[in-house]
Image (cartoon, rainbow, N blue to C red):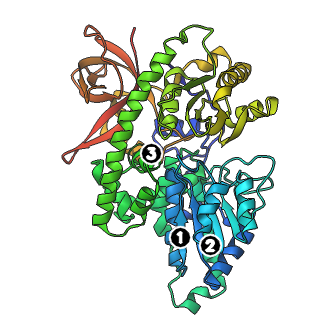
Amino acid sequence: MKIRSFPVNNIEDDLSQDLHPMLRAIFLHRNISCHEQLNTGMDALANFHSLKGIGDAVALLETALREQQRILIVADFDADGATSCALALRALAMMGASDVHYVVPNRFEYGYGLTPEIVEVAAGYQPDLLVTVDNGISSIDGVAAARAKGIRVLITDHHLPAQQLPDANAIVNPNQPGDEFVSKNLAGVGVIFYVLLALRSSLRDRGWFDQQGIECPNLATLLDIVALGTVADVVPLDQNNRVLVSQGIKRIRAGRCVAGIKALLEVANRPWQTLVAGDLGFTVGPRLNAAGRLEDMSLGIECLLTDDPQRARELAQQLQDLNLQRRQIEGDMKVQAEEILSHLNMVQASAPRGLCLYDKDWHQGVIGILASRIKEQYHRPVIIFADGDEGMIKGSARSIAGFHIRDALDQVASRHPDLISKFGGHAMAAGLSIRYAELDRFTCVFNEIACEHLKSEDLEGHILSDGHLDIADLDINFAEQLEQAGPWGQCFSEPCFDNDFIILNQRVVGEKHLKLVVAHPDHPAQAIDAIAFNQAPMPTNVQQARLAYRLTVNEFRGVRKVQLNVEAVLLG
């Protein structure tokens, strides 16, 4: 692992000169040049009118409400899908819908998206309108099957579309051709939130709420759910997404969130009063995702739907138990993957630049996490496969900067049309299905494409540092300024610094984490706590090391202290 500085950014700015100099540099590193770009108030939220298909979507939903039609939400089985589903159900109920149901495919039985098989399940509910959330843009056969049964289909999705779009009654997806919406980075939950904003606006203008004798809903009260899904899906935090996340976090910190989010934080021993975006991504999201990975995501959806704190706590505990089970499975799979990799000479220049790994016993619901772990360790695109049905295997892909994984799969499909059964995804993550008999051929083709696009230097893991911190800034005040300057996340990375430190003490905690006490060389008597997760101990004779770290606030028994969250340790 190497530490690199952010490239020099010579953009002109009008950021306040009163800003802390390091904080100003951090913003410039992230291409923020004016205070308007830092506005995370609701007034900075992009308008829904430029979303292609939004008018048709609203018309479908308005008709369903006015005619008291049955609406069925078809959700994805991850945290984005679960939050999208819960958001739609809550918001539609607030607008007077009384006949709304949901179905979420079990990934082990039906796979991803609106397949013809899940349409058969959906048909059992006898819906008039079927609404997909966080899926559907690639469901050509599924939409056709639903339309053939006389079911109208509204697709809300954010995944990249193929050349052919499904023949739905309406499609809202900021990434579809011809869409002019300013943010292409909305998560699925963000897309359905915008559809609901547009629906509320239309209903209000037409006097619907007065006619029904119900209060016009404040949809901002649901931004805690939007924030969770946005962060958990690791979409880029452009300004529009930062507005959604920031507003949601404010609601959670004020205790005005759904009972399920509060319960998930409680079982993880994370106080909601000081929550940051990272807590949604690394604490709440994984516990919610555990349902879809190991069992049925309806457990997570129900946790987000209940208003009963006791029921929410019971469901959150079940999700906590599933997450612990997932960790054990993941750990076992990681050991097995390392055994496979030991035969590939990964330290050699001839090592594959695109990795494909398979084991017949690997758990289909955990392969995405394993792919992320292997990608982080070897810094190259990774696809992990597990057994599917009838001779098929399913893969979960994760990638690195500079290698668009969905486009790479599209290249495979273009060159070898018979090789991939189906695929879809983003630049950094994708899913696919192939025949087991074609695994070796696919592995070779995928590696060939990786070699075409990736140079050897692209495979070198590195951490971007915002620079060195003076000893005066290694304190609680600057740490709190950094915390308040967020939310930080994908493509708006949490600030990272690097300094040389004296190692005063080190010990292993939690079996695999390195707890350090360090000091700045200029002030060797001022001890600073540090934690390096999943870091092996340093040799006992090491007295000084360069640390790449994030400056954070750690609260224990009501006492808030500065802590370094160590990203990398460089010796010598």
Give the left or right position of residue 160, taking residue 221 as reference: right
- Answer above or below: position of 130 versus 138: below
Q: Which residue is mark 2?
A: 127
The residue at 59%/48% (across/down) is: 111
Q: Nearer the viewer, residue 382 or 393?
A: 393
Q: In this orientation, which residue lies closer to the viewer: 170 or 123? A: 123
Q: Secondary structure at mark 3?
A: helix
* Number of marks in picture: 3
Find the distance from the CA under tag 1 to the CA under tag 3: 27 Å
Q: Nearer the viewer, mark 2 or mark 3?
A: 2
Residue at figure coordinates x 26%, y 28% from the top left: 528
Percent position of residue 432, x then y: 64, 38
Binning the other alpha carbons within 10 Å of mark 2 as few (below 14), some (14 to 19) or many (20 upward) gives many
Q: Which amino acid lies under the numbered mark 2 shown in the image of this protein?
A: Pro
Q: Which residue is mark 3?
A: 281
Pointer 2 with pointer 1, Cβ within 8 A: yes
Q: For the residue marked with disc 3, what is the amino acid? A: Gly
| Residue tagged 1 | 101
Mark 1: give few (<14), some (14-19) or many (20+) Cα within 10 Å.
some
**In the picture, which quadrant includes the C terminus?**
top left
Q: Is residue 251 visible?
A: no
Query: Is 490 drawn above or below residue 3 in the view shown?
Result: below
Q: How far across and down, in percent of the image, does residue 83 sit?
A: 50, 58
